[in-house]
Image (spheres, rainbow, N blue to C red):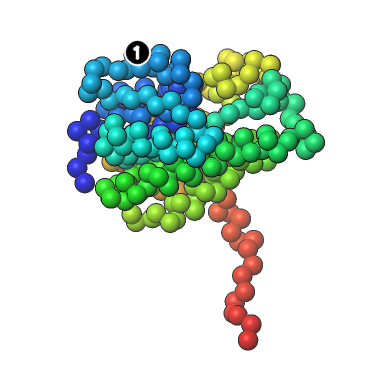
Amino acid sequence: MSVHPRGRVVLLTGAAGGIGQVMTEALLTAGHCVAAVDRDTSRLERLASVWTTGADSRFHAICADLGSQAGCEQAVEATRVQFGTVDAVINNAGIGMSSIRPDAETRHPSIEELSRETWERFLGIFVHAPMVITRAAVAMMKQGGWGRIINNTTSYRTMLRVLPYGAVKAALEAMSAVWAKELEGSGITVNVLVPGGPTDTPFIAAETGWPRAAMLRPQIMGPPVCWLLSEESNGVTGTRITAARWDPDLPTTQAAQRASRAIGWPELSADAVWLSSQPT
């Protein structure tokens, strides 16, 4: 397949937030087209004011509510209409614990506090939306024989300590592992990209009390996401890249190897017990 004359076409959700904005700018600088999906109209407009350069712009803002199936499908269709296809999906959109209450990052909600409505809201953004968007886009990737699915999950520590955020991110990690196996050999790769810890963006509320200077810089997400969109990463699938471990002084492929481990929890596979034969 020939590369799009303006780079690959990337659908990036949560594109106007802290990490999303960094990835949007890095991908545009690398020469790709970005369909920037977000529900925050004002932030999208600010991005558009910088990156829209006439009718042939490689940046296209899409305001969509990913909490609904219609919003997810609208985002994929708007990308196709604007750029003709979708080569890559980056499922980055999210809602933080501070949406439950400002101090929920550090004073985690109890079982009794987490209502069904809260669970459904988190599941909608972190599980349902990536599934709907990926399902709608993957046919175009298969047709082109090339594609990238990149999911932003979280650290394992968070998965095991923070509800509902950790649990829904763990679900996305497991989905990523399954998709990587399913699509192996198709030219479509599935990988996870995480910062590696709390990142200095508005996603982390001031009420946490965490020192901003000690947090990771969102800019660390730029080099690994660009590498994952490059031809260098062809065939690399089923990996989890921790951006904080990316060494910019190394050649990119070596930096990727240093920052990577297998996706999901393959070390637990030895615990499974399978029947060696069917009962007669």
Quadrant in the picture for residue 73:
top left
Identify the image quadrant of the C terminus.
bottom right
Q: Secondary structure at mark 1?
A: helix
Q: Is residue 7 left or right of residue 192?
A: left
The answer to which image quadrant residue 88 occupies is top left
User: Residue 111 sits in which quadrant?
Assistant: top right
Residue at 19%, 33% in the rendered image: 5
User: In this orientation, does residue 15 appear?
Assistant: no
The outermost residue toward the bottom is: 280
| Residue drawn at the location 64% of the way across and 61% of the way down | 271
How many badges with numbers are in the image?
A: 1
Residue 267 point in image, percent of width and height: 58, 54
Q: Position of residue 213 (x, y in %)?
A: 58, 14
Q: Amino acid at mark 1?
A: Ser
Q: Please say whether residue 141 is visible from this viewpoint.
A: yes
Q: Tell me the residue at 63%/63% (across/down).
A: 272
| Residue at image point 73% right, 30% down | 108
Q: Residues within 10 Å of mark 1 (few under 14, many from 20)?
A: few
Q: Percent from the top left, x then y, of residue 23? A: 41, 26
Above-or-below relation of 217 to 233: above
User: Measured along the vertical axis of the image, is residue 43 above or below residue 156?
Assistant: above
x, y percentage for residue 167? 64, 41
Residue at numbered disc 1: 49
